[in-house]
Amino acid sequence: MYRNKDLLETVFRAIDKDNSGVISMQEFTDVCTSLGNHNGTKFDEKQITDLAVSIDLDKNGVIDFNEFLEAFRIVDITDPSMEQI
């Protein structure tokens, strides 16, 4: 179950600066760096790379929309059909 899927799609498209349909490692690094600069938190390159690699489930070097969604997946534990997940 994905909550706020439309919002996540908007965020994904904003990060995907070249409109390629995927988030490159450079685009991901750029947005993480910008967010860190904005709120005063400095992320080192290894932290950003480790996060990107963990989101890139098929390990092809880019983050597609489904992988991005998966990073934000919320399992509704009140739904009995979700108990086995």
Image: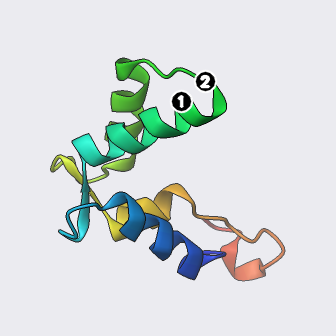
- Residue that badge 2 annotates: 41
**Residue sitting nearer the eye, 36 or 9:** 36
Task: Specify whether 17 is left or right of 73.
Answer: left
Which corner quadrant of the image does residue 76 belong to?
bottom right
Looking at the image, which residue is at 35% across and 69% down?
A: 65
Residue 75 x, y percent position in the rendering = 68, 67
Which of the two residues, 79 or 62, is positioned nearer the viewer here? 62
Whole-percent x, y for residue 83 in the image: 71, 69
Tell me: 2 left or right of 51: right
Furthest toward the right, the residue is 78
Residue 1 showing in the rendered view: no
* Callout 1 crowding tier (Cα within 10 Å): few <14, some 14–19, many ≥20: few
Q: Residue at horizontal 35%, vertical 21%?
A: 45
The residue that appears at 55% across and 81% down in the rendered structure is: 6
Task: Kindly report which numbered mark, 1 or 2, lies closer to the viewer in this rendering.
Answer: 1
Q: Image height check: is 83 above or below 48?
A: below
State left or right for residue 71 relative to residue 31. Answer: right
